[in-house]
Amino acid sequence: MKRKIIFGVIIFLCIGSAKIKTVKAYTVTAQKDGIYAEAIPDTIIDNAPALFQKNVKKALKYENKYKDADMVTKANNIPYPYDKFIDVAKKIRPSDEIVIRNPFCIYNMRGEGKGAAPSRYYFLAEQNREKLCYFSLYIDGDNQKIRFGYDKPMDQYFKYDEKTMKDAIFYEIDFITYAETPDKVYEVRNQNDSGNMMAGSNEPDLEKTVKKFKQKDYSEKKDEILSYLAKAKKKGVSRKTEKNLKLELKDDYVESESAEKNLGIQKLIYPAAGAACVIVAAAVIFFVRKRKKSSLG
């Protein structure tokens, strides 16, 4: 009797589970394309999808919590960048395929040009092959955490056309962002109207650096920018940043290829070291026994 009851319960569960509709969640993948892709640290680009999803989820939580609140309450309780990123997050549907691609950096004479670490890594997020938004990831210098950034004015007014500006390099001079191709220089964003001071107004060394950079052709500028990024990538992401990212993403964390290789080397080193210790120990025992036998003889 008990067997019949158990069998009946199993059949009921199977039929019930067959009727349950599977809810399809949107997918996010990274595509390493464009001239900057190989110059960006693997830890950042490989974990961009998980970081994007996490911040979409966070933005929607703020939206659900304060959707009926007045503007003042929202302004006081929804922090940057979620106050603006909410509008992007609400556009995403469960059936969407999001591809994060065409990463780039904007070379800045004030920072990068002086050897500082890249301030931000930008990404294009496409929704079903159409532009969804631009967003950025950057390393917080205070706590070594990777932060998510969304600049709504840039997203709206960044005049970049991938078709006509293929293989463009990006740099900023006097608060104007340029996209330069082998054939032409485009102005893609102008922030001078926000009241910023001109770059060379009171910094003579910077003015010389900017002047020297302007005199270079596309290939020379490209070499300078990619060389700078390659050096930054070689230094890698700090162990503290990796540790923070692992704690933040947990099971969604993606181990970079370089880290996997280092882990593989460590796995090889430890057994080899152990084997070497065994050999040395065996040699010592053999030597001691031999000496004892010699002394007894």
Image (cartoon, rainbow, N blue to C red):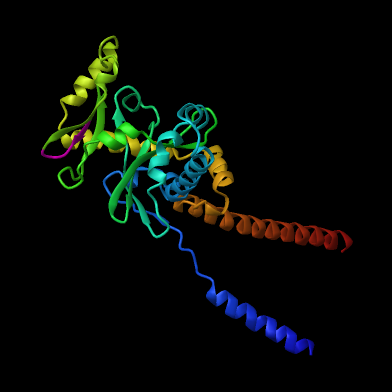
Whether 264 is drawn above or below 120: the answer is below
Instruction: Please tell me which residue lies in front, 121 or 7.
Output: 7
Splitting the image into 4 quarters, where does residue 93 fall? bottom left
Whether 87 is drawn above or below 214: the answer is below
Instruction: Please tell me which residue lies in front, 24 or 107.
Output: 24
Q: How many marks?
A: 0
Splitting the image into 4 quarters, where does residue 26 fall? bottom left
Farthest residue, direction left: 183
Q: Residue placed at 37% from the left, 38% from the top?
A: 121
Residue 3, image x and y in percent?
76, 88
Farthest residue, direction top: 202
**Magenta residues, start to end:** 178-183
Instruction: Determine if the magenta segment contains residue 180.
Output: yes
Residue 167, image x and y in percent?
20, 44
Instruction: Please tell me which residue lies in front, 78 or 297.
Output: 78
Q: Residue placed at 32% from the left, 50% from the top?
A: 126
Left or right placement of residue 284 versus residue 48 in this view? right
Q: Residue placed at 27% from the left, 52% from the top?
A: 130
Residue 173, image x and y in percent?
24, 24
Left or right placement of residue 104 versus residue 43 in this view? left
Instruction: Determine if the magenta segment contains residue 39.
Output: no
Instruction: Please tell me which residue lies in front, 214 or 1.
Output: 1
Q: Quarter of the image for the N terminus: give it.
A: bottom right
Q: Quarter of the image for the C terminus: give it.
A: bottom right
Splitting the image into 4 quarters, where does residue 27 fall? bottom left
Residue 200, image x and y in percent?
25, 14
